[in-house]
Amino acid sequence: MIELPQLTLASASPRRAEILCAVGWPFIIMPADVDESEVPGERPDDYVMRLALAKAAMIAEKRPQSLVLGADTTVVIDDTIIGKPGDLNEARGMLRLLSGRWHEVLTGVAVQSVEGIASAVVKTRVKFRGLDENSIEYLVTEGSPLDKAGAYAVQAQAALFIEGIEGDYWNVVGLPIGTVYHLVAG
């Protein structure tokens, strides 16, 4: 029998909380408020790792005896970070950019404890079918795109338009839970 130690989730993401609940992992939520601005010239994998480490460190300072999980997810196409859209028009533009193409979803994961920190970046490739304007409008109006990197949720309306996934599905949802377990278990 495995025992999952309680985590302090340094995130307000409802999807990360849902994934932890789905696997029965006990946790409390204590969101970290870090600046998510990109550093000029920063590679996408370095970006998500920097933010995951910063989130974990911020909450570990407040809860030094806890096992703290920090994570950050972004979408990357043509080596360009596609974060969360600022408005619905930006969401439409992101979906047009992703239409009919492969892109990567990157998640930086950092687990900090009194013993130290373990971290990883998980990459998953995703391909959308070609999206016509009706499909894009459906995703924008029904898919709540403003709080999602790339303006879509693979586990919701966007599932109708996903042609392929190579890698960890849970990473695309928002938390590569198998990687989290591996980092915690050592």
Image: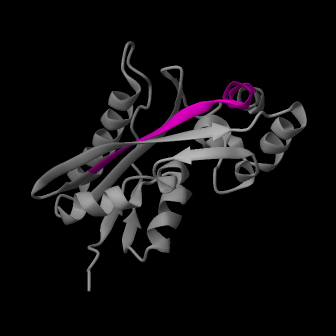
- Give me the residue at 61% from left, 35% from top: 150
Relative to 145, say whether 29 is above or below. Answer: below
Asked if one can make out residue 155 in the rendered structure from this viewpoint, the answer is: yes
Q: Position of residue 147 (x, y in %)?
A: 62, 43
User: In the image, is residue 104 part of the stretch drawn in magenta?
Assistant: yes
- Give me the residue at 47% from left, 50% from top: 171
Q: In front: 143, or 155?
A: 155
Residue extending farthest left: 115
Q: Position of residue 70 (x, y in %)?
A: 34, 50
Q: Quadrant of residue 20?
A: bottom left
Q: Position of residue 72 (x, y in %)?
A: 42, 42
Residue extending farthest top: 41
User: In the image, is residue 25 part of the stretch drawn in magenta?
Assistant: no
Residue extending farthest right: 134
Asked if one can make out residue 67 in the rendered structure from this viewpoint, the answer is: no
Left or right of 34 in this view: 104: right
Q: In front: 59, or 179?
A: 179
- Give me the residue at 69% from left, 24% from top: 97
Q: Quadrant of the C terminus?
A: bottom left
Q: Quadrant of the N terminus?
A: bottom left
- Give me the residue at 44% from left, 25% from top: 37
Q: Position of residue 184 (x, y in %)?
A: 23, 62
Region of the chain picked out in magenta, as a range: 93-110
**Count the marks: how many?**
0
Residue extending farthest bottom: 1
> Is the image coloured rainbow, by chain, by secondary structure, or in one colour?
one colour
Relative to 67, say whether 116 is above or below. Answer: above
